[in-house]
Image (cartoon, coloured by chain):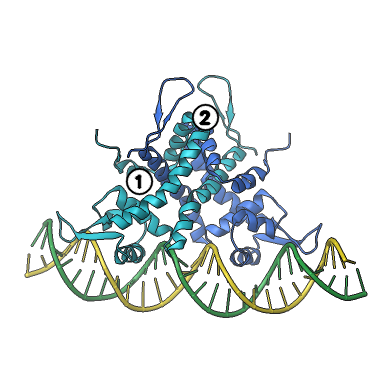
Chain colours: A cyan, B blue, C yellow, D green
Amino acid sequence: MQNKIGIAPSGGENLLFLTDDQLRRGIEAMFFAYRAFTADPDLILAEMDYGRAHHRALHFVNREPGLTVTALLDVLGVTKQSLNRVLRTLIDDGLVESRVGRRDRRERQLFLTDKGSALERRLSETQRARMRAAYRTAGPQAVAGFRQVLEAMMDRDTLRQYKALKDLTEPK
Amino acid sequence: MQNKIGIAPSGGENLLFLTDDQLRRGIEAMFFAYRAFTADPDLILAEMDYGRAHHRALHFVNREPGLTVTALLDVLGVTKQSLNRVLRTLIDDGLVESRVGRRDRRERQLFLTDKGSALERRLSETQRARMRAAYRTAGPQAVAGFRQVLEAMMDRDTLRQYKALKDLTEPK
DNA sequence: TTATTACGTCAGGCTTGTTGACTTTCCAAT
DNA sequence: ATTGGAAAGTCAACAAGCCTGACGTAATAA
């Protein structure tokens, strides 16, 4: 009944049993950690009558300035109507700018204004701070493992989107 | 401008720089992985007109049979009214049983029925399968790191709740 | 010219969360 | 024994953020 899966470690010692309970702990860790992870931005967003959806939009527009509405739809995995309400308020409030596409005039390319950029930085800084602290506590090896497991959890399509995101690192 | 934080590794090689971009990758990994993580149960739940909230309730009642409504409220972090709607349907549908508290007759203790237990297992099995696969792909060292980082991301209160959960492992 | 794509929007519905107010039951302390 | 407060449940009203379906317009592609 107790589903045990032994995994031989690289070294030979420190045998890890993946019982259902071990897996359950991982599941619960995801639940609790994700909640903590979104708590800080949620506080800021609530101040100004925005929601998590606004944050996500800001994040990806910042990440890929000039991306089209369809591309954003794709990465967020929501419907056009759902995104539209969020994007509408961001544009009306002057956080996001929507320009007619350069290549294809049917497309709209999205950019953050200075104001939008400022909010994005304020939001993501709280998350980076939390992540930075966690990374420091857990150490570099843990960080590598963390990313490996998360990536292994994604399905093909999601992983493709994740990998397609540019590195923003200063270009040499 | 580029906020770099060098972390000295245990060994000495493999120096890890925690640039803002590195942190951003971690943030994005959380976003995408969490979405993938909830996708499987969501499909099953949609079949039977339940939502993620029902899943969470089932999970924790299964985890701690006989826990009180207040305790469940606490761990879920929602209001009584919000939980009540969900719990109401689960009880009416015969998945959860609510018994008058043994210690304190004001309290209600919650238990899964066989039917509730079956659904919980069906839901969590999809997540365990995904987690198991990820664990196998990433390896035992990655798994340890994964858990360490997630736990380090939780705030004090959340961590307390997480640690308070019993190990369901067969008692010796 | 016609079909298709990209975008935007109207309408309506669902889940899950929120506040606030009120009741019933029960324990505990004065 | 009375009273104060805790635990639970419920009613009502509201909002965010999803969804589907149906249209309309502009611009590109065939």
Tell me the residue at 64%/45% (across/down). Answer: B160
Q: Secondary structure at mark 1?
A: helix
Q: Residue under circle 1?
A: A157
Judged left or right of residue A121, residue A107 is left
Provide the chain ID for the residue under circle 1: A
Whether residue A8 is situated above or below residue A47 in the rendered picture: above
User: In the image, residue A12 lies at what x, y percent?
Assistant: 55, 19
Q: Chain of mark 2?
A: B
Residue matched to label 2: B140
**What residue is drawn where x is 31% and y is 60%?**
A95
Please report the residue visible at 38 percent of the width from the left and 59 percent of the height from the top: A54
Circle 1: residue type:
Asp
Vertical relation: A60 (above or below) B142: below
The residue that appears at 64% across and 56% down in the rendered structure is B74
A55 or B51, which lies in front?
Answer: A55
Q: Is residue A133 above or below residue B99?
A: above
> Would you say the residues marked 2 and 1 are in contact, meaning their CB atoms lie under 8 Å apart?
no
Viewport quadrant of the N terminus of chain A: top right
